[in-house]
Image (cartoon, rainbow, N blue to C red):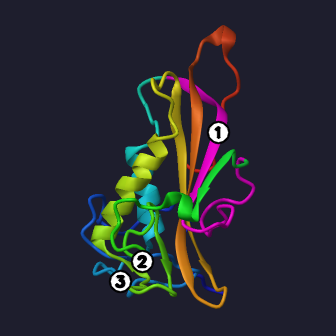
Amino acid sequence: EATFAMEVGSPLTTTDEYPYSDSWIYGQYGEDVSEECSSEEANADAADLLRRDLRKNVTYRNHTSFYYLSNPYVVCFSGSSNDCFSEEIPENYFPTDLAYQGDELYNENDDPHQDNLFDLLIFENYSGFSGFHECVSPEEMNFYFDEMTNLANGILPNPVGNKVIGQIEVGYAILWPGTKTVFHSMLVVRVDKNPIVEEEYEEGLELPHP
């Protein structure tokens, strides 16, 4: 049976990247979404683009030096109180050490609230509020990218030392508790970055996706 879902980690066919200029459907659920929301007719969703560009701009990737990563500390951010379960986030991941969910991600600069537009610092739309929509606009894409970047960097100590963001996962989900809720979740993996010294070398972490 054919499936049209974009595999996590697969190259995207879209040329749109941060800062975004196109709209994107919040998620795919195994369907071909080429004709949904985006003018590019690319079979990808908002979570795909946010995941790709957060990894590109936020995660530590120094290809000119040798290092290994250890001591993962995983923080979950979710638009709903769902323990960060989402499509496209790998099962059996590192256990979550800390979670910020739902109203804990309230956008204090949003007025009016509860209209589905920038209510939270990570995407969530609830059909019980006005303005419910499944296409994430360019303005929203850029807002959520900026806020997700701030949330990810916020789990680093100050000064940073050897702590870096090793990986970011972004997924999407839908709830139907009588009313429809669509939302994104983000897992941020903070790790220790260790230089490779031959006599002290330990086996490093294998992260699920490049």
Residue 75, percent across and down?
A: 61, 47
Whether the magenta-drawn stretch holds residue 114 is answered as no
Q: How many marks?
A: 3
Residue 45, compared with residue 134, is above or below; it is above
Circle nearer the N terminus (2, 3) = 3
Kind of residue sitting beneath label 1: Tyr
Residue for point 58% across, 17% down:
196
Q: Is residue 90 visible?
A: yes
Choose mark 1 or mark 2, whichever is in front: 2
Q: Are marks 2 and 3 in contact (CB under 8 Å)?
A: no
Q: Is residue 153 or residue 207 the one in the foreground? A: 153
In this picture, which residue range is highlighted in magenta? Answer: 66-94
Q: Is residue 162 or residue 4 the one in the foreground? A: 162
Q: Separation of disc 3 and disc 1 at Cα? A: 35 Å
Residue at numbered disc 3: 37
Residue for point 69% across, 61% down:
83
Kind of residue sitting beneath label 2: Asn
| Callout 2: SS | loop
Residue at numbered disc 1: 73
Q: Separation of disc 1 and disc 2 at Cα? A: 31 Å
Return the mark for residue 116: 2
Residue for point 63% across, 49% down:
208
The residue carrying pointer 2 sits among few (fewer than 14), some (14 to 19) or many (20 or more) residues within 10 Å by Cα, namely: some
Kind of residue sitting beneath label 3: Cys
Residue 193, compared with residue 21, is above or below; it is above
| Callout 3: SS | loop
Q: Separation of disc 2 and disc 3 at Cα? A: 17 Å
Whether the magenta-drawn stretch holds residue 93 is answered as yes
Choose mark 3 or mark 1, whichever is in front: 1
**Residue 112 occupies quadrant:** bottom left
